[in-house]
Amino acid sequence: MDFNKVIDRRGTFCTQWDYIEDRFGKGNGDLTPFSISDTDFQAAPEILEEIVERTQHGIFGYSRWNHTEYKSSIQSWFEKRYETIIKEDWVIYAPSVLYSINLLLEILLDNDRKVMTHTPRYDGFTKFLSNYNLYEIELKEISKGNYVTDFEKIEEGFKDGVSAFLLCNPENPVGKVWTEDELIKLTKLCKKYKVYLISDDIHMDITRKKYTPVLKIDSEYSIILSSTSKTFNIPSLGGSYGIIPQDEIREKFLHHLKNVDSVSSPTIFSVLSTITAYNKCEYWVNSLNEYIDKNCEYVMKELDGYKGLEVYIPEATYLMWIGFKNLNISQEQFQKALIEEGKVAIMSGEMYGDKHKIRLNVGCPMEKVKVGVNGIKRAIEKLMN
Ligand SMILES: Cc1ncc(COP(=O)(O)O)c(C=O)c1O
């Protein structure tokens, strides 16, 4: 595996590289993108081999996920990597993590539809949370890159009838990993007020601080949703999984999945890649983490303090949350300069709830990170002149 290897993704119906204009405007298709959260790395060689072998078989009939090989690969990943014991029976397959969050909210919420989550948050949540009665808790940055929640406010909301809490562990975009102590406090409140905790752990494997799955602490009110898609860069193979310990909720979920949404057969590539990733590719995840750490350190060294930029190394993810409030420029001005001078497509923080931030994706070869860093510098220089 060579994470330095640059592979052209243009012309592959690739959202990040081929559809830049959708997010950054007509005529901007030639920018270098650091945008949506996938990486520019090839999947682990064992996954590629598995897919080639299955492809050569040539028959792609209906398939199944509900077997020991699939479920035990997820079970053993949580046990060996995160010392968390889950039961095989708790595992379910679903088309995507967002699908599962939506369906769980429909199952768990009462008529008041009160749901709580943090801000800033992943924009994919924002899109569907507008259908609910939303309670937002601000993630406060008490020192650079160190975010905390407000447990008093959480309890107030719970008293007010919130029936589900949507957590993101680790958080996208701020990169926070929830500590064991924080999860203990949160799950205690959930139990006290009978609030279900849906934890989206899709970014769990790329971390610089110990990640604790909430199911290590509580399996009465907690549910984990995750996928191999981020870590192994395989979202277009389809599929995700959930770990739902509560029998009644799991049964309702599966009933809806099969009988209402008519999802019976998983994509075979999702099933095979998950089994292979979790059974054979832990070494690859460790190397990936080392590589991304270096990318983060490089950005930190080059950009932190640059003309007032505020950069920190996130506790997790390949997404860097960069502040520019000291520069006295608007997001609009910054984006214009990033596009016109920097020739780079970088996500506006406004989409996630902070208009003085940008989100830089460093899940790519170092060579591309350098293009991004230089683009940001050129944009700022132009604005400062
Ligand atoms: C926190 C988080 N959850 C979910 C998703 C999307 O997952 P899926 O495609 O499985 O719905 C993303 C993708 O960026 C994400 O960052």
Image (cartoon, grey):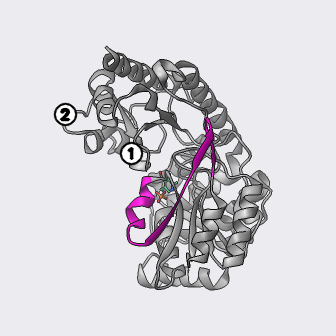
Q: Is residue 176 magenta?
A: no
Residue 153 vs residue 84, the one in the foreground: 153
At x 60% / y 33%, what residue is drawn? 292
Q: Amino acid at mark 2?
A: Gly
Please state the extent of the stretch shown in magenta in the rendering.
123-148
The disc at residue 27 is 2
Q: Tell which circle, 2 or 1, labels the residue nearer the N-terminal end.
A: 2
Pointer 1 local density, CA inside 10 Å: few below 14, some 14–19, many at least 20: some
- Image quarter hosting the C terminus: top left
Vertical placement of 7 versus 204: above or below? above
Q: Is 134 contained in the magenta span?
A: yes
Q: Position of residue 44 (x, y in %)?
A: 59, 42
From the viewer's perspective, tell me whether residue 374 is left or right of residue 217: left
Q: Residues within 10 Å of mark 2 (few under 14, many from 20)?
A: few
The residue labelled by disc 1 is 350
Foreground of the two, 263 or 34: 34
Instruction: Give the quadrant of the N terminus.
Output: top right
The residue most toward the top is 385
Residue 127 location, x and y as percent?
38, 61
Q: Nearer the viewer, residue 27 or 112?
A: 112
Amino acid type shown at disc 1: Glu
Instruction: Answer above or below: position of 114 versus 227.
Output: below
Position of residue 306 relative to residue 90, above or below, is above
Q: Secondary structure at mark 1?
A: helix
Is residue 124 positioned above or below 163 on the image? above
Q: Secondary structure at mark 2?
A: loop
